[in-house]
Image (tube, rainbow, N blue to C red):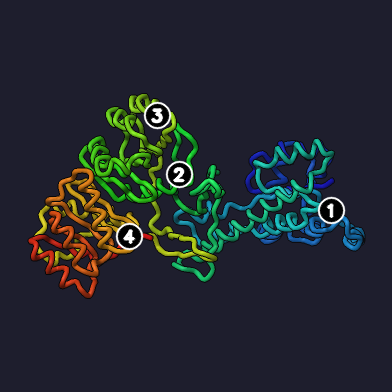
Amino acid sequence: MRALLSVYDKTGLVPFARGLGDLGFELVSSGGTATDLEHAGLAVTRVERVTGFPEMLGGRVKTLHPRIHAGILARRNAPTDNASLEEQGIEPFDLVCVNLYPFELVADRLGMQEEDVIEMIDVGGPSLLRAAAKNFAHVTPVCRPQDYDAVLAELRTQRGKTSLDTRRGLAATAFATTAAYESAIARWFQRDEALPQTLVPTFDLALGLAYGENPHQHAAYYVERGRRTHTLARVEQLTGRPLSFNNVNDLSAARLLARELDRPACVIVKHANPCGVGVADAIEDAYALALAADPVSAYGGVVVFNGPVTAALGEALAEQFVEVLFAPGFDEQAMEALARKTSMRILNDTERRPLAGSERDYKRVLGGLLVQDRDWELSDPSRMEIVCGEVSDGQWLDLLFAWRVVKHVTSNAIVVARRGQTIGIGAGQMSRVDSVRIALDKAREHGHDLEGAVLASDAFFPFADGPQLALDAGVSAIIQPGGSKRDPEVIEAVSDAGAAMVFTHRRHFRH
């Protein structure tokens, strides 16, 4: 029996190789791998003895040779293959253990020269691995240190053999590994292309989920390779049941909104839409505002804070039914209070890296993928235009707050806000005037004072009917993109009511 070992990551290499040697495998290796094995006292046949050629081109060429690849690719049940091996004096390989140069690790480092990154493009490793995986019927391909123990255990119980099912599974892992590796290289070469001709993202399984949006749907959470951070990066689950598909989806929506709020803030999300958002000088007050915004919808929601949960806040949260609670830290007394809520999923956020502004936004459609830049842009008052009325300092604060929130509400989106609190949200309606009506009705339903409130719309008003409903209810200022051919009619209606209106000249649809 014969094994070829050529690895960059030496984790677990020596015990694995020693186990193979104890089973009677001849160990064939090259370069640093061979040196490490020899230092551990293992007998190693160096690749150059097999090929008859020394390593060339500064190590670029070591294993790219017929005596290596023929030994891997030969079909043991094909008489012509066996005859060719015998004719050329080539011995077959039964196991190939390879892992690849850390291209992504090097490519992501700041200040790396292009020639240094290029040298981290592995050629021989993927070739060996793909050859072994192609011939899985006869060869065991191994490319991850975490598989060493299981492979050794099976080899020991099966007298130096592995099962076809095992080899098939390892082949799938090998091809996924080489595909992801090539994808990373392609992404690096395409790094200056906003929308490349061929898009090759890679996603790794991060979390198995019990089911999808509904119990009959299979689901899991995957993380895109190359992202600096993600929804659950450096997030520790302290208590509660495992996260569900809908939990993760709602958490992502809440976190994207919370990142835009620079004061102590609370965001409560249900079904990927905010139902209550509050900002205040203290995190406890922010929660009180968010909860009071729509306490009925907040029941069983995902609650996200941009500051630590204090003892007092923990007591308040323990009185509510919360599906997921997310914050950057929890007071010890807060955790004691929250211990009463055994089913609450409490997530401690220790991530301090900013979200990458270059991240693409993907939306799956039938048979394809819609790709766009994420809508990262924050509110910039200098680009906005007051088209009628006067805007006080307090109104500006509320208008900008509402404008940031409406960006995260499903279109057609309307947000009514007052004093750092959303008091009415209308989402996902086919008619914008219906979204206005829903937002106003929500505010009235929960006893909010609409007099002096502000309203944000994610896109322009095609008619004056929506603004008129809000003005009649007491709304004193409106912020919207503008751009309708009926803008003059809308401006006239707002002006006649003695209210103010701001055009942002930037739309924020979210579907």
Q: Which mark is residue 233?
A: 2
Q: Earlier in the sequence, mark 3 or mark 4?
A: 3
Quadrant for the C terminus, please.
Answer: bottom left
Q: Secondary structure at mark 1?
A: loop
Rounded to the nearest whole Å, what is the CA distance between mark 2 and mark 1? 44 Å
The amino acid on which the numbered mark 2 sits, given as a three-letter code, is Ala
Q: Earlier in the sequence, mark 4 or mark 2?
A: 2
| Nearer to me, 313 or 73 | 313
- Residue 18 screen position, x and y as percent: 76, 37
Q: Is residue 66 left or right of residue 110?
A: right
Give the label, 1 or 3, closer to the camera. 3
Q: Earlier in the sequence, mark 2 or mark 1?
A: 1
The amino acid on which the numbered mark 4 sits, given as a three-letter code, is Gln
Q: Secondary structure at mark 3?
A: loop
Which residue corresponds to the image point at 57% horizontal and 60% vertical from the top-left?
183
Q: Secondary structure at mark 2?
A: loop
Q: Earlier in the sequence, mark 1 or mark 3?
A: 1
As displayed, is residue 164 above or below residue 182?
Answer: above
Give the label, 3 or 2, closer to the camera. 3
Q: Quadrant of residue 154?
A: top right
Q: Where does label 1 land, which residue?
A: 92
Q: Which mark is residue 341?
A: 3
Q: Is residue 30 left or right of residue 22?
A: left
Q: Earlier in the sequence, mark 1 or mark 4?
A: 1
Tell me if label 1 and label 3 are in contact, CB under 8 Å.
Answer: no
Which residue corresponds to the image point at 25% horizontal and 44% vertical from the top-left?
293
- Residue 318 screen position, x and y as percent: 34, 30
